[in-house]
Structures are given as structure tokens and as C-alpha cells.
Amino acid sequence: MTTTTKLRPRALLHASGGPRYAAALAVDALGTGLLRPFLLLYGVTVLGLSAPATGIAMTVGIVAGLLCMPAVGRWLDRGARSTVVAASMLVRVLGVVLLLATPTGNTGLFTTAALFLGIGNQAWPAAHAALVATLAHGRERDAALAGGRALRNAGLGVGALLATACLTGGTTALRALAVVTALAYLAAAALTWSVHVHARPAARPSSPRDGEPAPRMRTLLAANVIYAFCLNVPEIALPLVLVTQLHASPMWPAVIFVANTVLVVTLQVPVTVLLSRFPRRSVLAVAGVLLTASYLGFLAAASLGPGWAAPTIAAVSVVCTLGEIVYAGSATALVTALAPAHALGRVLARFQFSTGFGLAVSPAALTALAPHGPAALWGGLAAATLLAASAVAA
């Protein structure tokens, strides 16, 4: 058991990269919040593409981003830090510019734009974690990573709210949102570039298996795929169950999404610091237990009458969000602590690949399980998550 870290706001800001980098994170998150939830709508409404074609293009972007992660990891291990973060932002600037240049009905150019956006979105988390790990160490680093996530969620939430307010403007408003997004990414890249964080490449051991993940790391990465499902539960599984199966008001998914964002923004740092007295592995296992309990709670709520099911699910979603907060505060921190210095970039890239893979397959898995009833959906998630938590604990 370790002592609890107490960080003053100024120390936390310094550990997170300083005021300019914090501003870059906020601007980047705001731009992502403006566009990411409405990229599908942009393809269908503005460009006149079919929904399946638009969805396939967005999936191609995610897959391309995941396939680029090994190259990102090697770049980070050569010492680059702020350069990689800035590059992830500039790549998305190019994606938005291509989006604006795509003529109506052109699926190919839209797919190319989604590809660049996907590469930037997947490269950013690993690059950001490596930058923070260069500036801070130990529990200070954990708190800094948590602070960055809270700030990013706040920016995403504000961006999504602004974009929602602009949707009444139709096609013109969506194009304007894309322009503002490009400018936000460009400003964020300039701020990040000005930070000039670079790490001296660590000495490489002479082992022929250098760079290969250790067995415990492989277990952690496999478990992380299951853990990552929780990030899509408030956005996909709960709206699907509430609206299409329980026929509840669309207000309930909106309330759950807002509550999730507010809780993450306000509790991510304090909860991470509070749990810093315990081993990271134990905390990550507890996150799995909390998520499992929430899934079982959703299963029990689904059997209640129409008047009670929706509010009960909303209440249980708080437990799910707490599990998400504990998971986010411990998973990246544990991976960063386990990673050897010479392979930090590659390890973080593998971790982002496992997270991205979980996020990519979870919509298909959740929507496939839901029609088979609450037991298949929530029981399956509970069993898989508990198995992942057991693997982490062992």
C-alpha cells in the first residue's frame, strides 16, 4: 500500500504539460465534440450518402487508425512526444479539409477524410499518455492522466452541446461546424507544438525478444478489450434498451449521457487520487467488479414495470459511470507503470489498439446481443467483464 498523493492545482497543471498544453487539450476536445457525434449525419445529410456507405467509411477510418498504431509506437520510442501529439491533430485538420472538399455523393473522398480523422483519433491517446509520462512520474503521473481525461470529457461535452444547438441550421450549419472543427484542431496543434517536449530514447536491452509484450501485459491488453465496452454502454446499449425495448422517453438516454459526462469531469481526478493508496492492479480489478455489478443491476431493472425500469436504469448507470471512472484512472496508469522505458511508446500503442478494438467491435456486439433479451445482453457483459477482472487480479 502506498501513500496518497496530494497535488495542488498548479502542480497538477505542470505535470499535465503546462497551461499551453492544457489549452491545446481543451481546444482539441472542443473540436472533436463538435464533429465526431455528427460525422454520420454530415455524410448522410450534407453529402447525400447512404447510411450504410457512411458507416462503412467511418469503420474504415477506425481500422486505419488502429493499423497505424505500431508506427506511432515506434515514433514515440525514438523520443518524440509533443511532435506526435501535434501530428495527430494536424492529420485531423487534413481530414476535415477533405471533408469540406468532398462533393455531394462522393463516397471515396469521404472515406479518405474519415481515414485521416480515424488515424488522428487513434494516435492521440497513446501520444498524450507518453507526453505526460515524460513530464511526471508515479502517482503524480496518474493524477495528470486523470486530469487530462476530465478536461477532454468537458471539452467533448461542450462541443457536442454546441453542435446540437446548431443542428437546426441544416446543411449550412453542419458545414460551419466542420470549418470551426478544422480551426480548433489547427490551433490545438500550434499550441502543442510550442510546448517542445522530447524524451531521450532509453537504452535497449540486448534480449532477442526486446519489444515483445510480457505475458502479464498480454493478459492486461486482452482484458482491456472487454473493459472498453463500458465506454459505449451509455451511448449505445442504454439508449437501445430504453427506447426500442422499454419504449421509454428519449429524455432518459439524454439524462444518462449528461450525468455520465458531468460525473467523469467532476470525479475523475479526485477518485483517481483517492485510490492512489492502493495498487493499480487491484484498483483495475475493482473497476471490473463495479462494472459487473452495474450490468447485473441493468438486468434486474429490465424486469421491472414500465414506470420503474427507466428511472432504475438511470440510477444504476451511476454505478456504471463510477466503474468507468475507476477503469480510466487505473488502466493507462498501470500500463504506463509496467512498460519498460525503452518500449513505452510501443506498449502504449498496443494498449490503444486494444481499447480501439474494443470500441470498434462493441457496437456490433451490443446490438447483436440486445434482440436476444436482457439476459443475453447484460448477463453476457457481466460474465465477460467479471472474467476480465479476475484475469487482471490474478
Image: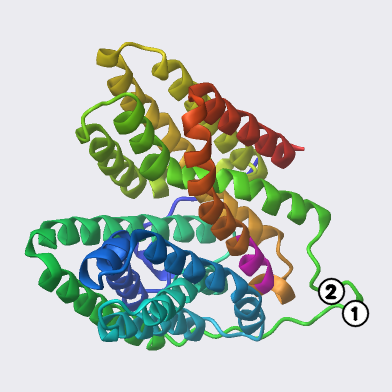
Give whichever of 194, 328 is nearer the camera: 328
> x and y percent of residue 198 in the render?
55, 85
| Visible residue check, residue 244 | yes
Query: Looking at the picture, does residue 328 appear above or below residue 347?
Result: above
x then y, percent, for residue 52: 40, 60
Is residue 201 shown above or below 38? below
Q: Residue at x 18, y 61 (%)?
A: 163
What crowding class fits label 1: few (fewer than 14 Cα within 10 Å), some (14-19), or many (20 or more)? few
- Residue in the picture at 37% in, 66% down: 13
Main SS, magenta region, reads helix
Which of the 4 quarters of the picture holds residue 158?
bottom left
Question: Label 1 is placed on what type of residue?
Answer: Ser
Q: Is residue 317 magenta?
A: no
The image shows residue 266 at horizontal and vertical percentages of 31, 46
| Left or right relative to 196: residue 175 | left
Name the residue beneath numbered marker 2: 210
- Label 1 SS: loop
Front one among 253 and 50: 50
Q: In the image shown, does 117 or 143 lie closer to the viewer?
A: 117
Looking at the rendered image, the quarter that the N terminus falls into is: top right
Q: For the view shown, which residue lies furthest in the left direction?
A: 169
How is the rendered protein coloured? rainbow
Residue 191 seen anywhere in this rendered image of the structure? no
For the C terminus, which image quadrant? top right
Please provide percent x and percent y for residue 248. 25, 26
Q: Residue at x 8, y 59 (%)?
A: 168
Magenta residues span 346-351
